[in-house]
Structure formats: C-alpha cells, structure tokens
Image (cartoon, rainbow, N blue to C red):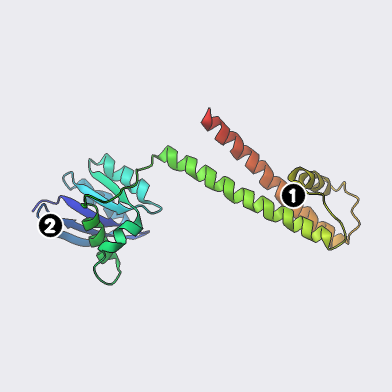
Amino acid sequence: MQITTVGLDLAKRIFQVHAVDASGGVVVRKALRRSQVLPFFTNLPPCLIGMEACGTAHHWARELTELGHEVRLMPPSYVKPYVKRGKNDAVDAEAICEAVTRPTMRFVAMKSAEQQAALSLHRTRNLLVKQRTQLVNMIRGLLAEFGIDIPQGLERALKLARQIAAKKSTLDAPAMALQILCILCEQVLNTHARLQTIDRSILAQQR
C-alpha cells in the first residue's frame, strides 16, 4: 500500500504521523522523534502532507517541500471539526490527514525564510514600542511621586532621560530615587536606539 496522504502533528520533540493510501486505508500511524522526521519523509514517495499552521509549520513545510512532497498548511480552527474523539496527538494527526483532502478546506500560504524574518522584525518592533511606552510611563509616575511633571510627548521624555542618564539633571529627589531613575532612563534610551535600528532595517526592506 503506497502512502498518498499524511497528517503530521507538529511538536517540539515528538511528532505524530497518520498516513493513508489512495483508498483512505491507514498505512502508518506512529510517533517520530524530531531527528526522525526528515529521514522518514525522505524515504516516502512524493505525497500530500497536511499540517496545522502553527509556529514551526513554515520551517517544516519548506523542508518537506524540498524533499518533493506537496505540503499544505491549515488554520488549527479549520482542522478542529475533524477531530473525532478525545484530543491527543494521534487523534490530531488523523484529523489533519482527513482535513487536508477536503475540497472546501482553506489553506495558509507557506512563508519563505525571508518572509518569516521580516515578520519577526515587525513583531520585535511592536514589543519594543510597548516596552518603551511602559518605561516612559514608569519614569513619569516615579517623578510625579516627587512632584515633578514631565510635559507630554515622547521627545520631551527622551530629552529628560538623556539628561538623567548623563547625570546632568537638576531634579530635586532622594538619591535612591535618582539612582532608579538613572537605570530606567538608560533602559528607555537603549530601547529607543534599538527601535531606530529596526526602523532603518524596515525602511531598507521597503526600498
């Protein structure tokens, strides 16, 4: 019996395979360690492989495509209706195997390594923007406790942060508070510098 379709349930260490032939009969149902995945599929004739579009799916899709297989990624929510009984890896792999053959299934386009890197760049930028905002708000809050008000605006906050970090401010606050402020200001300036680096990278990609 030749395998025509495989449902592959991805994991960090143990992967689950559910493979069927052209008539839908089960040929293979087994668990694979991470190191066994590529050798297993290398020894298979070209077939259709279904996977849920999770964190590592695009990497494995690229690897398996290079081996000559047709790989289709599906949103997990679209696979869920095909789970027939209690949830476990073997059941999930079987559901994936069934879902990938459905004519009405919607698939997720496989991302290249470059596309994933670009996406990671934007996600990192979003994270750093949040961190910078949190740091600025914390600095404002700490200064407010000592009756010091910073005018609104990021640039004004960064200007004060540079003065505090360089120990050039004339703030009237206890030494311990100034020490904490110095740490926070150095952190917000470092975060801002990293954001500027990322923004330059994003701009370069758009050219």
Q: Nearer the viewer, residue 113 or 39?
A: 113
Tally of marks: 2
Residue at (80%, 43%) from the top-left corner? 159
**Residue 19 percent coordinates (x, y):** 18, 56
Residue at (71%, 51%) from the top-left corner? 187
| Amino acid type indicated by mark 2 | Gly
Quarter of the image where the N terminus is located: bottom left
Q: Nearer the viewer, mark 2 or mark 1?
A: 2
Which of the marked residues, 2 or 1, is nearer the chain's N terminus? Answer: 2
Q: Secondary structure at mark 2?
A: loop
Residue at (52%, 32%) from the top-left corner? 205
Quarter of the image holding residue 172?
Answer: bottom right
**Residue 6 percent coordinates (x, y):** 21, 53
Q: Is residue 193 left or right of residue 111?
A: right
Farthest residue, direction top: 207
Q: Can residue 10 be seen in the rendering of this structure? A: no
Residue 24 disc label? 2
Q: Nearer the viewer, residue 82 or 40?
A: 82
Q: Distance of mark 2 from mark 1, alpha carbons?
A: 62 Å
Q: Nearer the viewer, residue 94 or 63?
A: 94
**Residue 37 percent coordinates (x, y):** 27, 53
Crowding at label 1, few (<14), some or many (≥20) Cα neighbours within 10 Å?
A: some
**Residue 148 percent coordinates (x, y):** 87, 56
Identify the residue position indicated by label 1 in the image.
Answer: 186
